[in-house]
Amino acid sequence: MEILISEAMGGESLDRLRESFAVACEPELWRDPVGLRERLASGVRALIVRNQTRVTRELLDAAGQLEVIGRAGVGLENIDLTAASERGIVVAWTPEQNANSVAELTVGLILALARHIPAADRDTRAGHWNRHRFTGIEILGKTLGVIGLGRIGAATAAKARALGMEIVAYDPLLDSDSLRALELRARILPLEELLAVSDVVTCHLPATSATVGLLDAARLSLLKPTAYLINTSRGTILDEAALIDLLGRRGIAGAALDVRAEEPPAPSPLSAMENVILLPHIAAFTTEGQRRVVTAVCRDVAAVLRGEPARFFANFPLPRR
Ligand code: MLT
């Protein structure tokens, strides 16, 4: 077998890949590191993953024939990029293909929190008709704090601005003169200031050594008691215990989490909190977003196996060995 897929994936692009290569799709293989190692040791040339397969240095040591890893998504925290690069293995990814899907979900969560939509739905299904209890707030004129103004953060900011929100952003790579900030009319602020002035804070950061734990108890405590917090990026960037404590004391108005430090998460007090929305890491999961993601990753994996350069790569476009 030339191409191994260790997580759930499908679509026409994958069908086309099967016409040219021997492809094994084993959606549960990510749960079995030993089995995965054995499969990779059997001469696999390409591995395609989402975010659950841990592509470690040890795993790569067993993958002597591996030329390319295709990451169907944007986060790279599950892949040891340094180890892959040292072994000359291309890491192809999809840095922009699901950005709009994530941004659209984030906007949905802003409105869902501001208008208590999930809680009102649950209450009405239970036979109640509590109109005043679910009085919300308008987002028009409110301040959205965007932590991380990359592709997803910027797409979210643009949509929120179209809905009449003011944008402030924290991004260590940008200042207020940066073109992206100017185009979005976003004020770039230090993180602490952003947390203190925002009505809604949304996180769009990758999980790196600089971002894991960034929103710790001290920083979370800067949020306004009326603020909402949204995380559709990576669960590890915030201290979940501190967030639970803050929500329990009404230190903020509510939160929406599409991502968790541990996925799937262990049972948590968050599940019982009415002002919290919990989703199973679905921000990137739209028909359109997934079609773009799978198409791009299949195209680049096929290109590398044919000796052609990948278009979207995190290290280099052709194998180096
Ligand atoms: C991404 O990183 O692209 C999204 O969070 C979805 C995923 O992890 O596959």
Image: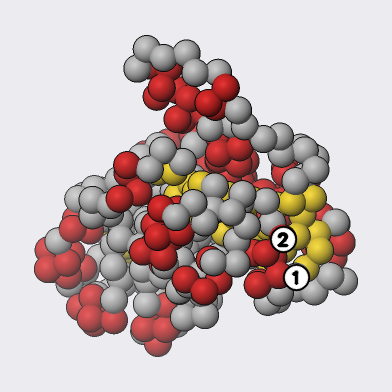
* Front residue of this view, candidates 291 and 195: 195
For the N terminus, the quadrant is bottom left
Disc nearest the viewer among 1 and 2: 2
Secondary structure at numbered mark 1: loop
For this orientation, the residue located farthest to the bottom is 86
Q: Residue at x 57, y 59 (%)?
A: 203
Amino acid at the residue labelled 1? Leu
Is residue 42 at least partly visible in the picture?
A: no
Q: Residue at x 22, y 58 (%)?
A: 30
State whether residue 307 is above or below residue 31. below
Amino acid at the residue labelled 2? Val
Q: Which mark is residue 4?
A: none
Mark 1–mark 2 CB contact (< 8 Å):
yes
Q: Residue at x 37, y 71 (%)?
A: 79
Residue under numbered circle 2: 197
Q: Position of residue 23 (x, y in %)?
A: 27, 50
Q: Is residue 42 left or right of residue 172?
A: left
State whether residue 42 is above or below residue 73. below
Residue under numbered circle 1: 189
Q: CA distance from mark 1 to mark 2?
A: 10 Å
